[in-house]
Amino acid sequence: MSNTSLPLSLDIVVPVYNEQATLDTSIRRLHDYLTGQVDVAWRITIADNASTDETPAIADRLASELGDVIAVHLAQKGRGRALKHVWGSSPAEVLVYLDEDLSTDLAALPPLVAPLLSGHSDLAIGTRLGRTARVSRGGKREFISRSYNLLLRRTMSVGFTDAQCGFKAIRRDVADRLLPLVEDDAWFFDTELLILAERAGMRIHEIPVDWVDDPDSSVDIVGTAVEDIRGMLRVGSNIARGRIPLEAIYAEFGRRPFEPPRVPGFFGQVVRFAAVGVLSTAAFALLYLVLQGVMAAQAANFVALLLTTLANTWANRRFTFGVRGRPGAVRHQFQGLIVFGIAWAMTSGSLVLLNVAAPNAPAQVELIVLTIANLLATLVRFALLRLWVFRAQVRRGVAEAPTPPPASGGPDASVSHQPHSRGPHANAPTPSDRKTAVADGLRQEANPS
């Protein structure tokens, strides 16, 4: 359709770096699809990341030959930097990002942007890890992708399943609020954006995609994974320390959840914690037996205990203490890692004592000693979780309030996004309360008359 007479609905951004071999084919294929299948006003933006080959010239030629295609040239390299620049200046209602190789089937584009154009969701991502997704890629990439996303979900307590799929969209008003908070300018950019969005209570829509791996991809998988882990540590630390104003963003865009569940009583906590502990201990034993054959006993103990502790903290947060809200999740995981340090000291100490008493003890004896030490550490973990990590929830008797007060604002705080936070079980006592300022509304919810 012609895009000259309508407000711009979609800006499809394609970041590129030294893609002279495939750029022409990919952009023409994308342009043909949009022309025939998308019935809202759109444009394609080629974002050149300081390419050193013929990519800039090809991008300019495509922009001159094809309608609704523009080329933007950046002096510095970085996918995140390119998206920040283009998204930050685009007038489009919805901003899209696609990988240049078009590995994702373009048929997924309309369902990706539909919930954003309708206002139902705030961000949308394609997932290669959904049950109905169809993916063709090597075993190494598959293993690294699934391991990274599993680690991300367990350590950052996020719900989205595929952080690095190059197929994402975001509403412009949401991007305007979040982009200044994203520090990364490279591959971790979209993961960081998703973490902040979910922590701020925004709705992230996922669609399973058909995805074919590009065998000629120049991405350094190992290097990217290392940078991603560093990014997770940085973002997690900033959230735990309150350095990111997520509460203020929640006040503007967040969707108020249903009434938080009650925290189980002491007996229920003991039963649930015991069940989680039994599963954790069994998982620890299995992991240790597997790892002990390929690494030293101390290293095997450390890795097995670390992995089971991450899962243990998540399970106890959700099932033992009934905490389902997003706020506080990262802090709880960091506190859980401190508990892990204590548990590791206990189990490692037991292994040291065993090695002193019986230097040639077989692996089966090591396993028995470590299992007993792990059971004792589990008791210590319960006490620390109940009296320290989740103390506020236990004392209140309800799950952590998932609607935090705004960090800034006042009587004139924005209420234009209230439709996103309404629901049949919203906490606001009356319809008139929904029309008041965010801060006043939250205080009324906390102290209903």
Image (cartoon, helix red, strand yellow):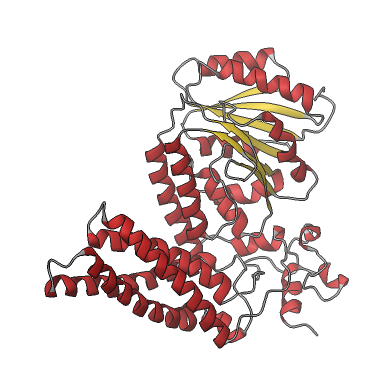
Where's residue 240, x and y in %?
48, 65
User: Residue placed at 81% from the left, 31% from the top?
Assistant: 40
* Residue 160 x/y as whole percent: 60, 52
Most foreground residue, 21 or 316: 316
Q: Is residue 345 visible?
A: no
Q: Residue 280, percent across and down?
A: 43, 68
**Quadrant of the rendering where the C terminus is positioned:** bottom right
Quadrant in the picture for residue 73: top right
Q: Quadrant of residue 261?
A: bottom right
Q: Is residue 331 above or below residue 300?
A: below
- Say if residue 45 shows up in the picture: yes
Identify whether 75 is placed above or below 240: above
**Residue at x-position 56% and y-position 57%:** 158
Q: Nearer the viewer, residue 78 or 300?
A: 300
Residue found at x 72% / y 61%: 255
The total of numbered circles placed on residues is 0
